[in-house]
């Protein structure tokens, strides 16, 4: 699915049902969108695991086809991982029936196979409400 060397480790981790972020080996800064060098100190980057929790920053529900990526309706969102507050991940929300998204809502990651309208299915980290 992804033939960009910089982001490939993210998608490889998702296939293993792991969530990772790019980070600087020197100053430990989390970097998203991945870079080969840290924009802060110029150090080399690597990948580190993230915990499963995040908070909801922004979302919308797509009711009509705009770009033809997925069957409608779907809810793209931006989440901030609990252990990487500088990172904003673009994802999809999968909330239980009757659960409405709200800002700063606590979420948990899960991994699902997403099937775009064009192209191959892929495993992606998506988020849902915390079920305890």
Image (spheres, grey):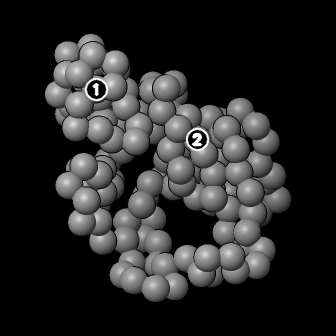
70, 38: nearer the viewer? 38
- x and y percentages locating residue 107 in the rendered image: 60, 41
Where disc 2 sits, the SS reads: strand
Answer above or below: position of 17 versus 84: below
Distance CA(mark 2)–CA(mark 1) = 22 Å
Please say if the residues under marks 2 and 1 sit with CB atoms less than 8 Å apart: no
Which residue is at 67% across, 38% downward? 57
Left or right of 123 on screen, residue 53: right
- x and y percentages locating residue 47 in the rendered image: 24, 36
The image quadrant that residue 105 belongs to is top right
Q: Residues within 10 Å of mark 2 (few under 14, many from 20)?
A: many
Q: Nearer the viewer, mark 2 or mark 1?
A: 1
Q: Circle 1 is placed at which residue position? A: 38
Left or right of 56 on screen, residue 125: left
Answer above or below: position of 32 versus 27: below
Residue at the farthest bottom position: 118
The image quadrant that residue 78 belongs to is top right
- x and y percentages locating residue 50 in the rendered image: 37, 34
The image quadrant that residue 72 belongs to is bottom right
Quarter of the rendering occupied by the N terminus: bottom left
Judge whether residue 132 can be spotted in this image.
Answer: no
Q: Residues within 10 Å of mark 1 (few under 14, many from 20)?
A: many
Number of numbered labels in the structure image: 2
Which residue is at 24% across, 49% downward? 6
Labelled disc at residue 6? none
Judge whether residue 127 can be spotted in this image.
Answer: yes
Left or right of 124 on screen, residue 59: right
Where disc 1 sits, the SS reads: loop
Q: Circle 2 is placed at which residue position? A: 79
Quarter of the rendering occupied by the C terminus: top right
Which residue is at 24% across, 66% downward? 3
């Amino acid at each position: 699915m992804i033939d960009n060397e910089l982001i490939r480790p993210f998608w490889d981790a998702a296939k293993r049902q792991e969530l990772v972020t790019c980070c600087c080996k020197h100053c430990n800064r989390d970097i998203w969108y991945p870079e080969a060098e840290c924009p802060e100190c110029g150090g080399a980057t690597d990948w580190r695991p993230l915990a499963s929790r995040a908070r909801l920053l922004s979302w919308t529900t797509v009711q009509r086809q705009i770009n033809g990526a997925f069957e409608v309706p779907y809810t793209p969102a931006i989440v901030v991982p609990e252990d990487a507050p500088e990172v904003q991940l673009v994802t999809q929300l999968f909330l239980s029936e009757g659960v409405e998204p709200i800002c700063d809502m606590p979420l948990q990651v899960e991994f699902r196979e997403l099937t775009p309208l064009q192209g191959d299915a892929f495993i992606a980290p998506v988020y849902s409400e915390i079920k305890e």
